[in-house]
Image (cartoon, grey):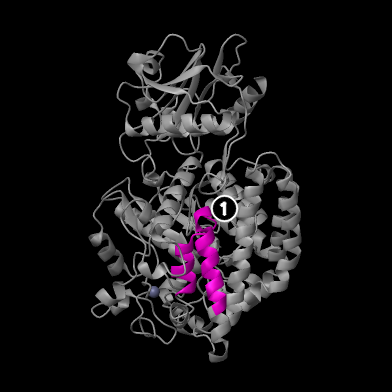
Amino acid sequence: MSKNTDVLQSTLSLRAVGGCHGLAAAVMVAVLFSVGASAQVILVEDGMARAVVVTAAEPVETAGYAAQELVWHVEQATGVQLETVTEPDVPEEPYSRIYVGDTETARRNGIDPAELPREAYVLRSVGNDLFIVGREDDQDPLREENPNVGTLFGVYEFLESVLGVRWLWPGELGTYIPRTDTIVLGAVNALDAPALRFRSFYWGRMRAIAEGHATLDPEDVPIGFDPDVAKQYADAVRVLLRRNRMGGLDAKPPTGHTFAGWWHEYGEEHPEWFMMRRDGERGRLDPDERHVDICVSNEELQAFILSQWDGGPILRLGAVDRPGRCYCDDCRAWDGPQPEEIPWFARRMYETDHRAQEAFAGATSDRYARFWKTMQAKAEKRNPDVLVSASFLFENEFPAPTTDIRLNNRIYAEYVQWQDPHLRYFPVPEEAFEWLKEQWKGWRRTGIRMGYRPNYLHDGYVLPHFETRQSAEFFKFAWEHGMEGATFDSLTGQWATQGLRLYIHMRLMANPGLDVDDIRKEYFAAFGPAADAMERYFDYWEDYAFEHLLRIIEVFWERGWRYSIYALYAHEAFPPESFVPAEALLKEALELAAAAETPEYEARVQFIQAGFEHARLAIRMAALFDGQEDIAEDRMDEATAALKELIAFRKDHQHLFFSDLQWVSSFWERRRWNVEPLLEALASE
Ligand SMILES: [Zn+2]
């Protein structure tokens, strides 16, 4: 019993609510912990139920769901199903009562959810009973915009800390629950909440399917998910993300490319409001370009922006989604010194090819910092509490300012490494990694609030193309340097090839204080006796990504956006021979896992193996298209057979949720490969 208690103690006492984000005032007790010799909470002992789960007489949606989650996981761990009762019907016999959510008994014991911060929860034992209480309501507990899920988060903390549950990937196989016949903990009194205010991956289409706002596009069915499996997958992902405490989106300041499209709306009447090209004309060379940035030093435009603002809590000033800025003398006078020597991995940041001919192509960080500050001073005359959303530290504003301009915590921006191909996707060259950190620190020194919103999880198609060390280290670095939340641009759902990195990201978002090696160990432990072999398997691919970093950049660079054209050149990035050493490691892992008494370890290795086989089938298809949209006439038969095999593999394995096949079909493949003639050939077989 003391082992479980120690785990809970060390986990809970490490983290206290509040501090950086103004929660502290609302919190009376950070963490108060003591282990009493006499009091203990017993859920299950020697395979026998010793507790009941108690909810309010009429529990709200979140409390009911939280109780179900507790009971289900305990049953998986012990084989014992705890009874759930409502407060008026609590029997006298049980040794312990586990009160889940807001109850009269909790309030009598001084736990009032209304006094808790958003997303926070209390875990407190009183005698032999345990209270798990947070804010809760009747909204959908799985919606990431809903912060009233403290009770549910409390249950997940309990399952993680006391039972050692880990949620690795969507579905039951990805849910690792150590078996035990006894669940006991000592006295506990903790108040906690997720460290980051918001934590999310964007996964638009499947999320909409899970929430019932969308259905699968029928055109994605032939080479992707069947509709019923797509829905099951989407539901499972939603559950997985919540179990890993993704959410808090209600607290994320809004961001966006505010001035996109303004040129078309106002450019004719006021060309002087928009960016000057190097040739002295206003606007982009392409008259249809929506992304024409503004002339930030123009005071008439500044007044117009303010006249368009509603005077509300947020003033949005996000630059357009295209590099290249105004070349006029007034704007350039606001710029800081440009680097004397441009780093080799950041050249695109400063010398963006054709855009260098068109517009100002250097760093405009000081210029925009001054713009935000100027606009803030003007806006505060109308609303002293206004928050300026600068939106993104991206493209020309990515490098830290080089003057000593001081900003403040009423300006918010999100850090997005992009522009140069050496900075876009982890892994990046070691020097670039250090440079990325310097830019973050430099922006933080100005005093602004910062979030993190990188694009690198878009990378890699269905391949085992990932790393864990740099991305995790950077995330922890950002957390130590003021990151208040993170939203990742994508969740491509390649759980069986890139799942280790996805798992690390979920864990760090929930708790950025965790050690990366510890998280990796958690993941590998789910493979039982094959843990070491699986670690070597993942290390092989991680090493591959580092060793071939520059070569893979070259494969894609002149050809388009790597994240979007990956399927066209996947076979060049990961040729068939790269799979050979990995195959041997998987074989070894399978043999080790097969020797275990429980089948779950072998099943998990087979899950990873499905990702491996799928990747190999996908690069064969890529090699047949070989960078072309249409299959060459003389390869039709071979390609038809290859597609047949790929589809058969997907249909046979889709229930594993090894890959988000909706994303694979709609984003990577159908947009790049013309599979129609092949599907027609298959239909006529
Ligand atoms: Zn200008």
Q: Quadrant of the N terminus?
A: top right
Residue 260 higher or lower than 405, as above or below = below
Q: Nearer the viewer, residue 632 or 556?
A: 632
Q: Residue 49 at what x, y percent from top left?
A: 52, 19
Horizontal and vertical percent for residue 602?
66, 48
Q: Determine if residue 448 is in view.
A: no
In the rendered image, the vertical position of residue 548 relative to residue 474, given as above or below: below
- Residue that label 1 marks: 502
In the foreground, 268 or 223? 223
Give whichever of 333, 136 is nearer the camera: 136
Left or right: residue 169 versus residue 670 is: right
Q: Is residue 630 magenta?
A: no
Q: Residue at x 37, y 74 (%)?
A: 291
Magenta portion: prevailing SS class: helix
- Secondary structure under tag 1 reads helix
Residue shown at the point (54%, 47%) measured from the top left: 506
Q: Which residues are magenta?
A: 641-670
Amino acid type shown at disc 1:
Leu
Q: Is residue 71 above or below residue 432?
A: above
Position of residue 579 in the picture relative to residue 292 (left or right):
right
Residue 35 in the image: state x and y as whole percent. Answer: 61, 16
Asked if residue 644 is positioned above or below residue 211 in the image, the reply reads: below
Q: Position of residue 664 (x, y in %)?
A: 49, 66
Quadrant of ligand 1: it is bottom left
Residue furthest bottom as drawn: 633
